Structures are given as structure tokens and as C-alpha cells.
């Protein structure tokens, strides 16, 4: 069991390793505005990720709904390929994360966590105070990530999802 200064050293090493990991991840990918040319890749990821995927017109609407909608793709630096995306709405001091997905070949690598941390940091610097999102109760991987990032369940939206039918957990995070 770690005590006193040993615990402090261990926590600092852990924190330093997390910073190195985040830095390495950012070297691995970058975010940029989503463009219509990205939609074939985005739609492929969407269809691989969700039982009831968004349609192309929905993504086009998000791309062109500035300044409210922020649609970004996650691009693999070396392969120059879209490996994921995030879409969120920014209205005054509130943000709604509408959609986030990572291509299955790149999951479980910390990319979604790193992207969410970057987005949360940026919107906090811009003055946002509150972030919400909806998630299927059965999406344990996403729920685990949101819990790790200190989102809390605010409520339930009954009959929110279909194919298969499921309520949505409304999760929120207060930004300091």
C-alpha cells in the first residue's frame, strides 16, 4: 500500500503518463471541420456504429447549420483518413453533444476520450457552463466513457430510440 510521499510520486507519475498518452494520441490524429467530401467516410462509420444511423441529409444539415452546429472529423495523421467524428450544438452557455463515433478499427485506443477532453476544454474556455448528451442504456462502452469524464445521469427520455426501442439516458456535465 502506498503512503505519504510515495502516493504523491505515484499520482504524479500516473498524471505524467496520462499527459504523455494524450500528447501521443494528438500526434496520432487531429480534428478539423467536417466537409461534404467527408460524408462517405462519416456514413460508413455511422452505419458501423449505430443500429439506427443518421442519414446523409442529417449530416449535411449539421455541416451547414453554423454557428449553432459544430461538426468535426477525426483524421488519422499518417493515413490521412477520417477515423471518427463529433457533432455538438453550442447555444449560448450550453452545449449538446449530438453524435460521436470512432471507426471500429480505432476503438479502445482512447481516441474518443481524448477528443471529448479537447472539446470540453475548448468549450469551457469559450464560456460554456453545461454539457448534455443522450445515450442508450445498453451502450455500456459510451456510458463508461461518459462516467469517466464525470457526466451524471440527469434523467430518462422514454421511447427515444427505435430499432431496437429503448429510452435515452440524459447525461450532463457541469463545467467550472
Image: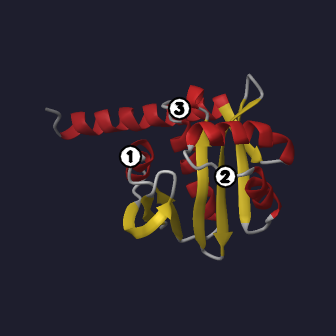
x and y, in percent, of residue 51 in the image? 54, 45
Q: Check contact, mark 2 vs mark 1: CB within 8 A.
A: no
Residue on which disc 1 sits: 144
97 above or below 46? below
Q: Is residue 170 left or right of residue 96?
A: left
Q: Earlier in the sequence, mark 1 or mark 3?
A: 3
Mark 3 Cα shell of 10 Å, populated few (<14), some (14-19), many (≥20): few
- The answer for how far apart the CA atoms under marks 3 and 2 are is 20 Å
Seen as rendered, the residue at the extreme bottom is 92
The quarter holding residue 94 reads bottom right
The answer to whether residue 124 of the structure is visible from this angle is no
Q: How many marks?
A: 3
Residue on which disc 3 sits: 107
Q: Earlier in the sequence, mark 2 or mark 1?
A: 2
Q: Nearer the viewer, residue 150 or 107?
A: 107
x and y, in percent, of residue 136 in the image? 44, 54
Which residue appears at 44% of the width and 69% of the height? Answer: 157
The N terminus - image quarter: top left
The quarter holding residue 29 reads top right
Disc 1 element:
helix
x and y, in percent, of residue 86 in the image? 64, 50
Disc 3 element:
loop
Residue on which disc 2 sits: 54
x and y, in percent, of residue 79 in the image? 74, 23
Which residue appears at 72% of the width and 52% of the height? Answer: 55
- The answer for how far apart the CA atoms under marks 2 and 1 are is 23 Å
Seen as rendered, the residue at the extreme left is 1
Q: Check contact, mark 1 vs mark 3: CB within 8 A.
A: no
Mark 2 Cα shell of 10 Å, populated few (<14), some (14-19), many (≥20): few
Q: Nearer the viewer, mark 3 or mark 2?
A: 2
Seen as rendered, the residue at the extreme right is 37
Amino acid at each position: 500500500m502506498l503512503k505519504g510521499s510515495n502516493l504523491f510520486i505515484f499520482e504524479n507519475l500516473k498524471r505524467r503518463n496520462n499527459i504523455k498518452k494524450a500528447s501521443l494520441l494528438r500526434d496520432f490524429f487531429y480534428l478539423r471541420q467536417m466537409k461534404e467530401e467527408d460524408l462517405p467516410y462519416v456514413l460508413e462509420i455511422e452505419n458501423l456504429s449505430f443500429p439506427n444511423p443518421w442519414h446523409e441529409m442529417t449530416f449535411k444539415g449539421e455541416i451547414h447549420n453554423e454557428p449553432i452546429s459544430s461538426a468535426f472529423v477525426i483524421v488519422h495523421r499518417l493515413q490521412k483518413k477520417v477515423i471518427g467524428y463529433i457533432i455538438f450544438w453550442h447555444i449560448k452557455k450550453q452545449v449538446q453533444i449530438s453524435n460521436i463515433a470512432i471507426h471500429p478499427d480505432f476503438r479502445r485506443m482512447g481516441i474518443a476520450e481524448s477528443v471529448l477532453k479537447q472539446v470540453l476544454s475548448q468549450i469551457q474556455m469559450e464560456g460554456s457552463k453545461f454539457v448534455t448528451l443522450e445515450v442508450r442504456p445498453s451502450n455500456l462502452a459510451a456510458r463508461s466513457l461518459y462516467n469517466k469524464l464525470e457526466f451524471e445521469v440527469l434523467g430518462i427520455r422514454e421511447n427515444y430510440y427505435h430499432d431496437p426501442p429503448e429510452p435515452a439516458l440524459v447525461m450532463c456535465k457541469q463545467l467550472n
